[in-house]
Image: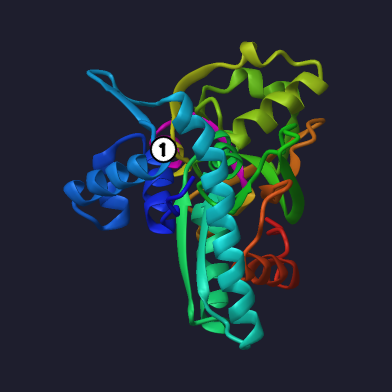
């Protein structure tokens, strides 16, 4: 092939694939849509083949596009590695760090850690994206982000997990709830409590269901009144009702200390877990990512003892 591939055009191409549309890619790259289209046209001329099929349903990669995509990702990764190597050679502490986090670490653990990390590495641009554990794994697996942190470790040969922070699930109820005066109740008692639960895909929900199954309590016997997509929504419901919700101790420590919620442990259920850092098994980690992994290992906060 006589033509040379333009690294910027390859980056635009991969961004379109990741975002699923030209318009979203343009927004992500801070370019106009005509510019994005022109870059893809130039790339198609360089490779001598169409890369996308367009239809009313959206865009899809052609056979040539699928072939090029794998090589394009490798080239972009090598380009990033080359830049990072040059920065290391010059002793620079800069770069970009985007972390995908599940809800609990994303809302209750990482903000303070990232603030401290940023103060130690002010030249590193830091971004945090919060979703559920299933989406975090997908983002890392598909190379949308280098690092994730979540509360559920699932089998995936493409991913590497390392435990970093201890967690425990507790039953949260309002202070006036009949169970609020007890610190521990039998596990089977949960069957008599109306519950607010997290959505399917949440690490918290998966941990609870596994613990119930190990204890011989079918999860489908729970009295689930409402399913919500966030811990904050669950806590708001619990404050206004005699319902309960099983959540991370990290997510209620401030409310328990302030007396606005009560935490109850379930005897006979192993609700302990870890939050895990996750990255691709054979992926490249930037200097910024490696620095953050070392930082988290050195600054692991202790699990709250409420």
Q: At x 74% / y 73%, what residue is drawn? A: 298
Q: Magenta span has 11?
A: no
**Image quadrant in which you'd find residue 179:** top right
Tell whether 228 sits left or right of 55: right
Q: Which of 255 and 174 is in front in this view?
A: 255
Q: At x 50% / y 60%, what residue is drawn? A: 258
Magenta residues span: 235-248
Location of residue 230 in the rendering, given as x and y in whole percent from the top left corner: 45, 39
Q: Nearer the viewer, residue 211 or 263?
A: 211
Q: At x 19% / y 52%, what residue is drawn? A: 32
Secondary structure, mark 1, is: helix
**Residue for badge 1:** 17
Q: How crowded is mark 1: few (under 14 residues within 10 Å), some or many (20 or more)?
A: some
Tell whether 23 sits left or right of 300: left
Location of residue 297 in the rendering, given as x and y in whole percent from the top left corner: 74, 67
Location of residue 83 in the rendering, given as x and y in whole percent from the top left corner: 56, 72
Location of residue 143 in the rendering, given as x and y in whole percent from the top left corner: 56, 46
Would residue 252 be seen by someone viewing this image from the given angle? no
């Amino acid at each position: 092939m006589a033509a040379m591939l333009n690294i910027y055009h390859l980056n635009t191409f991969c961004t379109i694939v990741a975002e699923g549309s030209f318009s979203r890619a343009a927004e992500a790259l801070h370019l106009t849509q005509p510019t994005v289209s022109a870059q893809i046209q130039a790339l198609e001329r360089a490779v001598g083949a169409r890369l996308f099929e367009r239809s009313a349903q959206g865009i899809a990669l052609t056979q040539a596009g699928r072939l090029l995509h794998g090589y394009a990702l490798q080239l972009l990764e090598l380009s990033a590695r080359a830049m990072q190597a040059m920065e290391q050679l010059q002793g620079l502490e800069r770069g970009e760090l985007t972390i995908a986090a599940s809800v609990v670490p994303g809302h209750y653990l990482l903000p303070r850690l990232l603030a401290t990390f940023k103060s130690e590495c002010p030249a590193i641009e830091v971004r945090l994206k919060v979703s559920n554990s299933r989406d975090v794994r997908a983002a890392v697996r598909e190379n949308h982000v280098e690092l994730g942190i979540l509360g559920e470790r699932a089998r995936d040969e493409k991913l590497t997990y390392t435990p970093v922070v201890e967690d425990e699930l507790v039953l949260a109820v309002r202070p006036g709830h009949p169970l609020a005066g007890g610190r521990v109740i039998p596990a089977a008692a949960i069957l008599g409590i109306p519950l607010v639960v997290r959505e399917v895909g949440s690490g918290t929900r998966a941990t609870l269901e596994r613990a119930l199954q190990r204890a011989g309590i079918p999860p489908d016997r729970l009295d689930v009144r409402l399913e919500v997509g966030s811990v904050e929504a669950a806590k708001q419901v619990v404050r206004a009702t005699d319902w309960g919700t099983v959540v991370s101790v990290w997510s209620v420590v401030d409310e328990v200390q302030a007396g606005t919620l009560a935490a109850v442990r379930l005897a006979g259920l192993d609700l302990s877990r870890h939050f895990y850092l996750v990255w691709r098994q054979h992926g490249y980690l930037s200097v910024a990512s490696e620095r953050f992994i070392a930082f988290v290992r050195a600054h692991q906060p202790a699990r709250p003892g409420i």
